[in-house]
């Protein structure tokens, strides 16, 4: 029980023989009841806090379960799609093996034919480089073939053979011009005029030209540019 004294409103002494009353406010509830009420309030607050915590935990668990279920569903779908693709790939197994065999054969052919020389392109180059009036009577050539040629071609331009030309021309100046054009043709180098003979119709000549490794690389070595493309007018021959 609690007792509270309230001070008087007026501090002046009572007049005459009047009796002064002191106002008193008292809480007659026992302390046990007050403590009990406070305990109930605290208990309600604790229960409310626990309820909120449990609700948050349940919500977190539900979100985690939903995300896990969604991920498992996506994984199962991806696995089914992968199995379908694998089945389709198995159907094309013979085609894949055939493509692999073709690639292997092409690689082997590139290695084997690294020293291959396209004689048609070489003869075309010799004719295109000839000035007007040059007529080729004979062409003979020899090359180094096989693995040695492939090694030389991979290392860079080098002498890998020789071609010998014989023909006729209007004059010696034309023969010299022909030699200069062959000197700059790709796949050819170091032209050497062996002989020039004058006759009533003009001159006849013999010339040797070195075949370099740039002229090699056959039909199985990938796209190649024509050997020694020379932008000149074809002579009458």
Image (cartoon, rainbow, N blue to C red):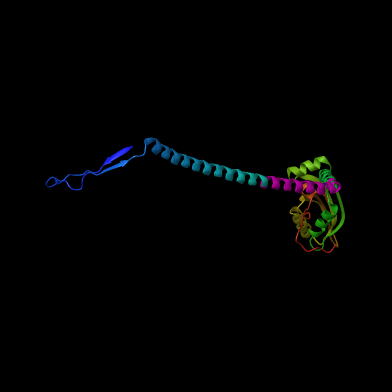
Q: In terms of depth relative to the viewer, which is nearer, 223 or 134?
A: 223
Q: Is residue 177 left or right of residue 29?
A: right
On the image, the x and y values in percent for residue 192 come to 78, 50
**Residue 56 against residue 181 in the figure, above or below:** above
Nearest the camera: 235 or 46?
Answer: 46
Q: Quadrant of the N terminus?
A: top left
- Which quadrant, please, contains the C terminus? bottom right
Residue 22 against residue 168 in the figure, above or below: above
Give the image location of residue 3, x and y in percent.
29, 39
In the rendered image, residue 98, in percent from the top left (x then y), is placed at 86, 47
Decide if residue 41 is in sight here. yes
- Magenta span contains residue 228: no
How many labels were placed on the picture? Answer: 0
User: Is residue 205 at least partly visible in the picture?
Assistant: no
Name the side, left or right, on which 4 lies relative to 139. left
Q: Residue furthest front?
A: 17
Instruction: Between residue 63 and residue 191, name the one nearer to us.
Output: 63
Q: In which image quadrant can residue 148 be found? A: top right
**Residue 69 image-quadrant placement:** top right
Instruction: Write the start and end of the magenta stretch as one range.
Output: 70-97
x%, y% of residue 220?
82, 49
- For image coordinates 55% across by 42% down, the residue present is 54
Looking at this rendering, what residue extends furthest in the left direction? Answer: 16
Q: Is residue 4 above or below residue 164?
A: above
């Amino acid at each position: 029980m609690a007792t509270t004294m309230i001070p008087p409103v007026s501090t002046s002494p009572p007049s005459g023989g009047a009796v002064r009353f002191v106002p008193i406010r008292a809480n007659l509830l026992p302390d046990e009841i007050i403590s009990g009420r406070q305990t109930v309030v605290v208990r309600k607050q604790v229960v409310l806090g626990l309820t909120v915590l449990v609700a948050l935990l349940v919500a977190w668990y539900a979100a985690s379960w939903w995300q896990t279920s969604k991920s498992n569903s996506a994984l199962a779908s991806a696995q089914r799609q992968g199995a379908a693709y694998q089945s389709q790939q198995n159907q094309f197994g013979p085609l894949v093996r055939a493509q692999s065999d073709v690639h292997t054969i092409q690689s082997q052919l590139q290695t084997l034919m690294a020293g291959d020389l396209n004689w048609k392109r070489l003869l075309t180059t010799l004719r295109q480089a000839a000035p007007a009036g040059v007529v080729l009577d004979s062409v003979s050539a020899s090359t180094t073939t096989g693995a040695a040629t492939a090694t030389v071609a991979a290392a860079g331009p080098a002498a890998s053979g020789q071609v010998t030309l014989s023909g006729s021309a209007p004059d010696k100046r034309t023969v010299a011009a022909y030699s200069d054009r062959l000197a700059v043709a790709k796949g050819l180098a170091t032209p050497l005029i062996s002989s020039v003979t004058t006759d009533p119709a003009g001159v006849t000549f013999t010339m040797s030209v070195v075949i370099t490794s740039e002229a090699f690389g056959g039909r199985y070595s990938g796209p190649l540019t024509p050997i020694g493309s020379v932008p000149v007018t074809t002579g009458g021959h």
